[in-house]
Image (cartoon, grey):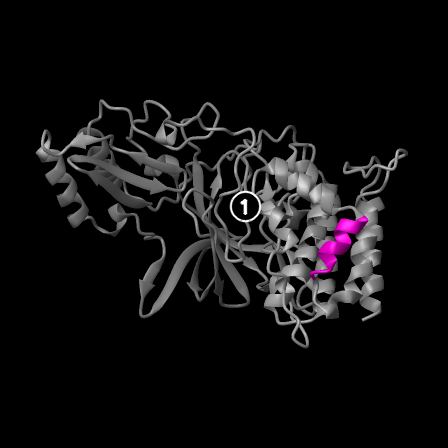
Amino acid sequence: FVHAFSLCASTMELWVFDRSGPYSSGPFDIHDEPDKFVRALVGYATMDEDAMGLDTFIERGDGCRHVTLDDASGNEMRVRLDKAMVRQRAIVCRGTTCYGTQNNQVAKFSWASDKRKLEAEQLKLAEQRGVKGVARLVAYRQITTIVELREGLEFPERHPFRGETVHFEDPPSATGSTNTSSHKRESSSDNASDNASGPKKRRSNSQKSRLATEFNDELSIGKAKPSLYMRGEDLWENRIYSCLVVTPAGRVISDFRTIKELLESMRDAIRAHQSLYTAGNILHRDISSNNIIITNPETVDGFRGMLIDLDLAKVRDSGPSGARHQTGTMQFMAIEVLRKVDHTYRHDLESFFYVLLWMCARCSWNNRFGRGGEKPPKDSLLRRWEIGSFKYIAAAKEGDMSVNALERIMGEFPEVFDIVKPLCLKIRKILFPLDKDERMTFGTPAGHPDQLYRPIIAAYDESISKL
């Protein structure tokens, strides 16, 4: 968490921002209550690392960073953290941060909602069911929860900022993003975690009592405490902070170096999704450029592309989602998901298609595939997929899936990607067939999922064979 304060004329308000939102002491006048003003300044000046909100779970020394986790056998395992690979640049979010580690592994820190099954549990379940092409869990430990950090604090009521009404039916697109500018929407599922207050705790009771004392006893406990909230019975969303280590490490799909590498990695990631869904009985629900990695097929059962990040995954047929809002990454979310239809495997396949288009029309230029003075468009058509409300993004994508509109998007590809255009048209035809009235359909067809997986994978195979 992060401390902050505002001082406007003689009115002061102390704030704490954590992964579930900000909360404050309530405003007070420093002239009327000078003792509170002095205690606040002394408190800020004398805080230790714990009270300041720094992550003390990571051990620092001798120029290295280490964490201690529990392996599959329950034994402690010390892991050295190397260079940061991904960092989510926002506050009220999962705060996903990934580090490379030894032995071709990745350490992932995140604040997941306690309303759904934790990623470590999903990964264990996938391995037990023989899923191929999905990252494997090596070690895990729960660190703390928002409930633990806020223990002893009182939240009498919810508070919308600036006195405005908070609208949830069609929220705006301004959310946290990762290092590839992927705007993420996350939701809770009906799978409540049993590990909301496990034995591994990072924060000491003394720290909790200091926070509670500072914000309740010393700072106007009788006043309403503003807090950011989401619709529901809880005043704020509890999140579970944990670290897990997975294998293998890889490059995100946006770092592809050749067209063949892109197409093979995309195809194998779809194969991994097929295995996760049909063998593992798990729906991923967050297909994006950040969650597909390029891997060495010699070390991972022949897969050149794999799926990672099961934070938003859900076991099939486990009842209604209970989500507070849609799941997924903004520019890759399926049209029906944007319109609040229950998430299905076909929606994830639609997201794979949007990732392919994004790689060809946007990331290809960053990866220097332009030839002979070619330049990317100044105003990409795909920009409409990440700006505005769900309603307008869904409308933009629906329009872009017509043949003529898709060809305009493909007109933004570098010339060397002309070989990929027939593949895009084939996938569009598979995912968006016409009904009897010649209208495009966006729903999930009845029957076995292979009716979509097989032709899409075959289309990739055909395109790869022509390279």
**Residue nearest the viewer, comparing 164 with 341:** 164
Vertical position of residue 7 compared to residue 180: above or below: above
The boundaries of the magenta stretch are 403-412
Q: Is residue 411 magenta?
A: yes
**Residue nearest the viewer, comparing 394 with 423:** 394
**Residue nearest the viewer, comparing 312 with 351:** 351
Vertical position of residue 67 compared to residue 29: above or below: below
Residue at left offset 77%, top offset 66%: 418
**Residue nearest the viewer, comparing 260 with 453:** 260
Q: Position of residue 410 (x, y in %)?
A: 74, 58
Three-letter code for the amino acid on which mark 1 is drawn: Lys
Q: Residue 172: in sight, yes or no?
A: yes
Q: Quadrant of residue 249?
A: bottom right
Q: Is residue 345 left or right of residue 291?
A: right
Residue at left offset 20%, top offset 38%: 8
Vertical position of residue 318 compared to residue 417: above or below: above
Q: Position of residue 373 (x, y in %)?
A: 65, 75
Residue at left offset 60%, top offset 54%: 291
Q: Is residue 150 magenta?
A: no
Q: Position of residue 173 (x, y in %)?
A: 53, 42
In the rendered image, the quadrant that contains the C terminus is bottom right
In the rendered image, the quadrant that contains the N terminus is top left
Mark 1 residue crowding within 10 angstroms, few (<14) / some (14–19) / many (20+) = many
Q: Which residue is mark 1?
A: 184
